[in-house]
Image (tube, rainbow, N blue to C red):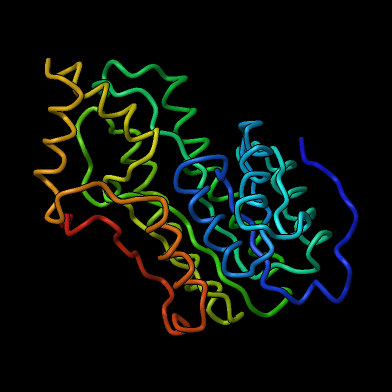
Amino acid sequence: MVESGQDMPAEEAQAKRAIITGAARGLGEGIARRLAKDGWSVLMTDANSAIHDTAAAIIDELEIASDRVVAAEHDVTSAEVTEAVVALGLARFGGLDLAVANAGIGGVEVDLVDLEVADFEQIINVNYRGVFLTCKYAGRVMREQGGGNIITVSSIFGQEPYPRVASYSGSKAAVIAMTLAFALEMAPHNVRVNTIAPGYMATEMQWTGLRQRAAHAGISFGEEVQRVWDLVPLGRHGSPEEMGALVAFLASDEAAYITGTTLGLAGGVVRR
């Protein structure tokens, strides 16, 4: 359900304003915390009701006004709910400068021939349809405004597919292609559109995937973590804070000439 609330006072409506999907934890939480720290007004959304606790924790941690960070439960696969979420952001903040289509799921790791159709459809609906809907409704607002910034979250596995996650890789490849085409459509309206392709990031979704891979390979979780570190030139997982830093840069005037680009955040892992 989308929450309602009073409109933000006009004098506060000039702060930079963002909507971030999938922000209850992980990369989305890291993005929201960084933007709030930098003075943005942030609407954090997630299908997980924990989004309210996450928003409250950020407010307390940063000691900022409670109306600067707003939480809403959000099914990104629903056109009606996503349109309402964007409308909520407009009502609360008076405009929209940035939308980050971050919500995504990893899904079960299994050979494609053994993947249940329902599991495939869920991955595509969240990872691809959800990004499309966020881009669609946020993009309409920014086109009307004559400016804005949209960032989607893809994956290095959308650039080089990985076995046993074929549907995940496919959904993230689709995000990359859609984002780059969307950037061309929105450039005449002064709206920049880019995608970030994270690699191995320190999130619960990553740990779940590594546990599945370790069990499949007959090794321990620690051994699988070490295998990943051996693959990454920088020798570690990336962090949600580093994701937040990249989003903050892409959303800033320092990145004013960057659009239609896929930026890797992968510690030196090179994908085709």
Residue 146 lies in quadrant: bottom right
Question: Where residue 65 appears, x then y in whole percent?
Answer: 75, 59
Q: Residue at horizontal 17%, vertical 54%?
A: 269
Q: Residue at horizontal 43%, vertical 53%?
A: 153
Residue 120 lies in quadrant: top left
Question: Where residue 252 appears, x then y in whole percent?
Answer: 51, 77
Question: Where residue 97 appears, x then y in whole percent?
Answer: 65, 70
Q: Residue at horizontal 14%, vertical 50%?
A: 235
Along the viewing direction, whichever of 178 and 256 lies nearer the viewer: 256
Q: Residue at horizontal 25%, vertical 29%?
A: 210
Q: Quadrant of the N terminus?
A: top right
188 in relation to 208, above or below: below
Q: Quadrant of the C terminus?
A: bottom left
215 in relation to 72, above or below: above
257 in relation to 122, above or below: below
Judged left or right of residue 92, residue 137 is left
Along the viewing direction, whichever of 8 and 153 lies nearer the viewer: 8
Question: Where residue 176 appears, x then y in whole percent?
Answer: 38, 56
**Could you tell me how many numbered marks the image carries?**
0
Judged left or right of residue 18, residue 196 is left
Residue 13 lies in quadrant: bottom right
146 in relation to 198, above or below: below
